[in-house]
Amino acid sequence: MKSAADLPRRSRRPRRPAWAGRTYSLLTASAFVTNLGSHGALIAAAFAVLEAGGDGGDVGLVAAARTLPLVLFLLIGGAVADRLPRHRVMVAANALNCLSQAAFAVLVLAGEPRLWQMMLLTALGGTGQAFFSPAAEGMLLSSVQGEQASRAFAVFRMAMQGAAVGGAALGGAMVAAIGPGWVLAADAVAFAVAGAMRAFLDVSHIPRRTPGGGMLADLREGWREFAGRPWLWGIVVQFSLANAVVAAADAVYGPLVARDHLGGAGPWGLALGFFGAGTVAGALLMTRWKPRRLLLAGTLCVFPLALPSAALAVPVPITVLCAVMFLTGVTLEVFGVSWMTALHQEIPEDKLSRVAAYDWFGSVAMVPLATALAGPAESAFGRTSALWGCAVLIVVVTAAVLCVPDVRNLRRRSKEVAVSPSEQATSADTESPVRGLG
């Protein structure tokens, strides 16, 4: 009998799963790095504003300065990412994020940064994100093939969510220990490292794109792809409303309820941590579970998204709130993986980034309005009524999207080949593997 030391070195080397190719592995590793840095930087930016003498309103202005260019440039970013090599768009966006965060860090470390300077640099970061996000999603969706795609997406999201939880915890600790300037500097380094990794992405599997008729033609083609699929635009509309009220509940009402009833920022941070842990657990679950009706299973798992708002409206004890947040994180990841798998299965490769841009646009467009109206809504109706309103709206829009037949009937295919809306319409008259009847 041979010992482990006698075995050939090659046989003892850990082997990646067949679906975890070089491109996918680089995408996952680089996303982990940037997510780790970015979630710490969000905390650092808020404290940088406060340490410079700003108040809560100034923190909101800096946050809005990032969201506005994200909304304005997302659709253009999607068209650019489908026109140019996606990895080059990602590297260029990372370079912009790196430079803007480095400049932000220098201002903070030098002392007394002005509000307009912080808003300008944050806006540059949001612009980079607007071009990066559609390119990154298109690159990820095209990097895996076959029946293991959903497992690959689950592992990717597990890495992302784990980095988000760890980055927020590490960033908070670093802000307290060494100050926000150094955390912003660390985020700039993270963007530089991730950009360097993304420069080595293998794009040989992506067909060469023929020049189109211009940016407007690309945008119109992306719109036709988006509008021609009821399940796609229906769920995007659903989440444009759901994300808006969740943002209002989490960013405005949650801290206020925590201050008045739960014991302050510490318990609220603990509840958010349980939500993050739930997303990791949900992604882990989806590495094993493959629901046949992708969007039906995913959409049913959106209903628990109403529970945190309802729990804050009561309000429940912190232990119950933590359990609710954990459950919500688990179920939301079931939707997230199912959604990515549906996009991968149904959307042609050359239109992935434009469709992703419409998805991102719908996800963030209503958030600034909702957070701005949260205060007036509390004054007009009361905090409890406003929170119950958030919960009811999530239930209503989720139930409404279940009325779309494609959402109920879209099925996982054993061989994932994207088809056009016209092809789907033609095949709808027969019992195809794409979409079941009834």
Image: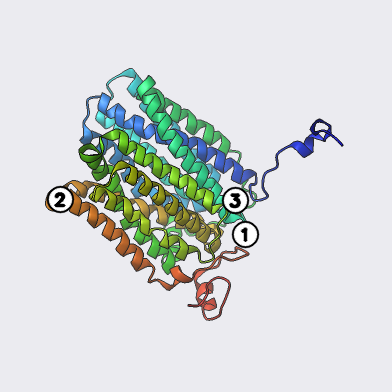
| Dot 1: element | loop
Judge from the rendering whether residue 297 lies leftward or rightward of residue 307; answer left or right: right
Kindly tell me whether residue 139 is visible in this rendering.
no
- Mark 3 or mark 2: name the one nearer the start of the chain: 3
Asked if residue 350 is positioned above or below residue 2 in the image, the reply reads below
**Crowding at mark 2 (Cα within 10 Å: few <14, some 14-19, many 20+):** few
Residue lying at the far bottom of the rendered structure: 429
Q: Position of residue 281 (x, y in %)?
A: 49, 47
Question: Label 3 vs label 2: CA separation?
Answer: 48 Å
| Dot 2: element | loop
Please give the name of the residue rendered at 26% of the width and 28% of the height, measured from the top-left corner.
Answer: 50
Residue lying at the far left of the rendered structure: 380
Judge from the rendering whether residue 121 lies leftward or rightward of residue 434; answer left or right: left
From the viewer's perspective, is the residue at label 3 or at label 2 nearer?
Answer: 2
Q: In the rendered structure, are the residues bearing label 3 and label 1 in contact, judged by CB atoms less than 8 Å apart? A: no
From the viewer's perspective, is the residue at label 3 or at label 1 nearer?
Answer: 1
* Residue at which label 2 appears: 382
* Residue at which label 3 appears: 143
Which of the two residues, 214 or 143, is positioned nearer the viewer here? 143
Q: Quarter-wise, where is residue 345 in the image?
A: bottom right
Q: Quarter-wise, where is residue 239 in the image?
A: bottom left
Kindly tell me whether residue 376 is visible in this rendering.
yes
Asked if residue 26 is positioned above or below residue 423 in the image, the reply reads above
Asked if residue 305 is positioned above or below residue 186 in the image, the reply reads below
Q: Position of residue 86 (x, y in %)?
A: 53, 47
**Crowding at mark 3 (Cα within 10 Å: few <14, some 14-19, many 20+):** many
Residue type, numbered disc 2: Gly
Q: Quarter-wise, where is residue 127 in the image?
A: top left
Please give the name of the residue rendered at 23% of the width and 55% of the height, measured from the top-left corner.
Answer: 388
Q: In the rendered structure, are the residues bearing label 3 and label 2 in contact, judged by CB atoms less than 8 Å apart? A: no
Which of the two residues, 129 or 307, is positioned nearer the viewer here? 307
* Residue at which label 1 appears: 147
